[in-house]
Amino acid sequence: MDPKIRQRRVVVTRQRGRRRLRVLIVGSCVLAVGAGAFLMLHTGLFSARHVTVRGAHHTPVATVVAVAGLTRHPPLLDVDPGRATARLEKLPWVQSAVVERHWPDSVSIVVTERVPVAAVALRAGDVAIVDGSGRVLAHGPDAPAGTVALVVPVAAGRPGSVLANVARGALVVARDLPPPLKSRVRTVIVATGGRVVLDLGGGLQATLGPPSGLGAKFEALESLLAGTPLTGPGMIDLTVPEEPTVSAARAASGASGAG
């Protein structure tokens, strides 16, 4: 073989070897840096050392932190906001949650809680507090202010469960009652055939029929009660709100138009 050709092959082989060595060195450095960064991100320096919780009024902050998986201050890299959010939204009072990581060492949680609208009596004498969707939020001795009593043909389960569909009509009514009526209504009742009846106290009731067209029915009831205050026993039928009927009820003593 020509010496020049042999020399050229040696030079080419050496150049290839140097390139391979450089690639190997660079690759090793990248792996070392990556491994170092991975280990560093899993040290206490980059852990969820600071957790802030906002919006949790009925759920203890400690419970929110625990359910989100942050009690032991895990590495921030291991915090999965999506999974933490899904777990938090299973808590009875939590309607929605937003979990965000903030490098290098913080996590923020913003909770939006459900609004109680009604209370269902329990056998033990307590009540189950529920929101407008039928979600049972808590059990307690008393109904919160601003809620109405609900009488439905189903039992309320544990916090976090949902009332059966038969209660939905009464829930919609309890949720949508305008303030002037909510202060007057004692109980929202699911009657035979799914009719919704309002107990106004003193034996006076108002039947809404099916829970549809509620705006017109509420307006008609407000007009009747404001025009001539009525006392029971008696029934106001608002099934057809344009033609409400009053049976057996009488005007309150001393009211305008009273007999």
Image (spheres, helix red, strand yellow):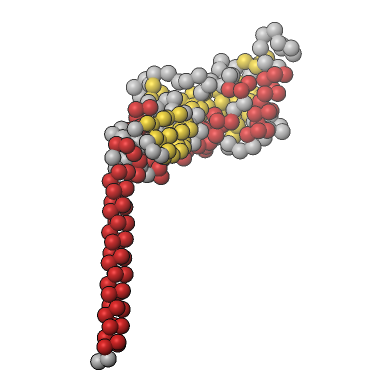
Q: Is residue 69 visible?
A: no
Instruction: Tell me the quadrant of the picture where the N terminus can be found.
Output: bottom left
Query: From the viewer's perspective, is residue 258 above or below residue 86?
Result: above
Q: Quick one: 67 or 247, which is closer to the camera? A: 67
Label total for image: 0
Return the residue nearer the eye: 236 or 215: 215
* Relative image position of residue 126 (x, y in whole percent): 38, 21
In the displayed orientation, state which residue is furthest to the right.
Answer: 257
Measuring 66% from the left and 25% from the top, which residue is drawn there?
221
Q: Nearer the viewer, residue 214 or 193?
A: 214
Residue displayed at 29% across by 69% down: 18
Give x and y (percent) for residue 189.
Answer: 51, 28
Q: Is residue 61 left or right of residue 3?
A: right
- Point out residue 130 in the picture as x, y percentages from the top left corner: 45, 30
- As drawn, which residue projects farthest toward the front? 3
Q: Quadrant of residue 4?
A: bottom left
Task: Report the quarter where the C terminus lies.
Answer: top right
Name of the residue lying farthest toward the bottom = 1
Where is residue 56? Give x, y as percent. 43, 28
Using the image as rendered, state which of residue 181 and residue 204 is in the foreground.
181
Mark yes or no: residue 61 visible: yes
Which residue is depicted at the point 46% across and 33% down?
A: 110
For residue 162, what is the image quadrant? top left
Residue at 49 percent across and 24 percent down: it is 149
